[in-house]
């Protein structure tokens, strides 16, 4: 297995050190690490250049980090397994000189050992690569929920929020669109689980018998950008009950389309995006057991957040401008370059993943 990892790392470049792996150039999302990124040098014209700075995205053993990452490397954490609650000790090797964290809170002991900054992949969401064209159709749904009806959904993706559907309909009369991203085989397997299957079967029954809902299950478990744009802009708000999640991009994808977000404040990362004019935070359950034990408490918190969002006028342009005032691909790339310059004395004006190279041509 280790040999296969090393072979893949070598096959990304040719003998001259030039990247030839087109899959790598198309997208960094989904990879555990990147052998280098691209950058624009200050005061230099022409196409972006490869920068010998590795990026660790997901959890890897220290020995694998030492073997596969370049001498100068950073972390852009994209997975909940890098959260402090999962790592008593610093999960990074000595090659890591900068940690770009999506999390609301970072361990003080970790921050003493290596520089931490607030920066993540959801900050990179931008209309230059995400379809956010204004949709002129009517609002079909009052609320959109993107989740997974599986064990992963219970652990990370907030599927337990579907338990509130009957009360949401009774209190607000909302029509809810549910996007279930779980694979059919996982749904079937997890409902039969002796530990969490009972909860999943209960939630599935609620969804099945809920009248004012639209259940969608895309094949093959993903929507293209055009479909997601229409779906989001057909909804009046996004409800995100996620918990163990490292700042999901669905939050910022909603904001760049002018859709307010109602977010569980106990999510690992993503609270920074929610302001007075673009959504609300609510005290949601960390797991399904908490919800079933304290249903009325969490229902009251959720309903207060819903009332807050819908009691104020929703101005699409204000939500979009508020996001780009702080984030977006250009600002995030410049911020990353600033901290890379500080770490290694480089002179670059922007740093970015290979897939964004075409957006930085001058």
Image (cartoon, rainbow, N blue to C red):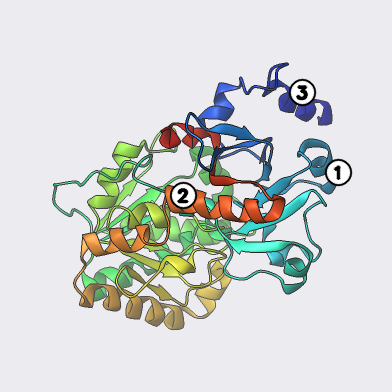
Is tag 3's residue or tag 1's residue first in the polypeptide sequence? 3
Identified at 70% across, 22% down, the residue is: 17
Lateral position of residue 9 relative to residue 274, left or right: right
From this view, report whether residue 77 is shown above or below residue 322. above
Marks 2 and 3, Cα distance to the nearest angstrom? 30 Å
Query: Residue at label 1?
Result: 63
Residue furthest toward the front? 43
> Badge 1: how crowded within 10 Å, few (<14), some, or many (20+)?
few
Q: Secondary structure at mark 1?
A: helix
Residue furthest toward the right? 63
Query: Residue at label 2?
Result: 124
Q: Nearer the viewer, residue 64 or 146?
A: 64
For residue 218, what is the image quadrant? top left
Q: Position of residue 242 (x, y in %)?
A: 49, 62
Is tag 1's residue or tag 2's residue first in the polypeptide sequence? 1
For residue 203, what is the image quadrant? bottom left
Q: Secondary structure at mark 3?
A: helix
Q: Position of residue 319 (x, y in %)?
A: 29, 63
Lateral position of residue 297 relative to residue 191, left or right: left
Marks 3 and 1, Cα distance to the nearest angstrom? 16 Å
Identified at 40% across, 80% down, the residue is: 301
């Amino acid at each position: 297995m280790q040999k296969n990892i090393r072979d893949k790392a070598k096959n990304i470049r040719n003998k001259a050190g030039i990247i030839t792996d087109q899959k790598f150039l198309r997208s960094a999302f989904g990879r555990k690490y990147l052998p280098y990124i691209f950058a624009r040098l200050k005061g230099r014209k022409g196409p972006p250049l490869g920068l010998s700075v590795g990026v660790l995205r997901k959890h890897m053993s220290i020995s694998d980090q030492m073997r596969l990452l370049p001498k100068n490397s950073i972390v852009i954490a994209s997975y909940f397994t890098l959260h402090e609650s999962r790592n008593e000790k610093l999960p990074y090797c000595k090659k890591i000189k900068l940690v770009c964290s999506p999390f609301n809170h970072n361990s003080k002991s970790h921050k003493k050992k290596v520089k931490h900054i607030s920066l993540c992949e959801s900050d990179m969401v931008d209309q230059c690569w995400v379809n956010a064209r204004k949709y002129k159709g009517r609002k079909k749904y009052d609320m959109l929920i993107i989740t997974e009806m599986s064990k992963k959904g219970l652990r990370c993706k907030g599927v337990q929020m579907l338990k509130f559907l009957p009360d949401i309909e009774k209190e607000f009369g909302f029509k809810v669109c549910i996007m279930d991203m779980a694979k059919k085989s996982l749904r079937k397997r997890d409902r039969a689980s002796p530990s969490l299957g009972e909860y999943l079967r209960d939630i599935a029954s609620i969804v099945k018998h809920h009248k004012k809902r639209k259940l969608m299950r895309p094949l093959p478990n993903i929507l293209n950008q055009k479909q997601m744009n229409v779906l989001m802009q057909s909804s009046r708000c996004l409800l995100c009950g996620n918990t163990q999640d490292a700042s999901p991009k669905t939050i910022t994808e909603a904001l760049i389309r002018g859709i307010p977000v109602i977010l569980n404040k106990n999510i690992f990362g993503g609270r920074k995006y929610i302001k007075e004019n673009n959504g609300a935070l609510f005290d949601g359950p960390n797991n399904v057991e908490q919800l079933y034990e304290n249903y009325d408490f969490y229902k009251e918190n959720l309903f207060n957040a819903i009332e807050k969002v819908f009691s104020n006028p929703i101005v699409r342009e204000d939500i979009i401008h508020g996001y780009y005032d702080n984030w977006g691909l250009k600002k995030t790339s410049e911020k990353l370059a600033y901290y890379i310059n500080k770490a290694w004395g480089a002179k670059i004006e922007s740093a970015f993943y290979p897939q964004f190279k075409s957006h930085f041509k001058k």
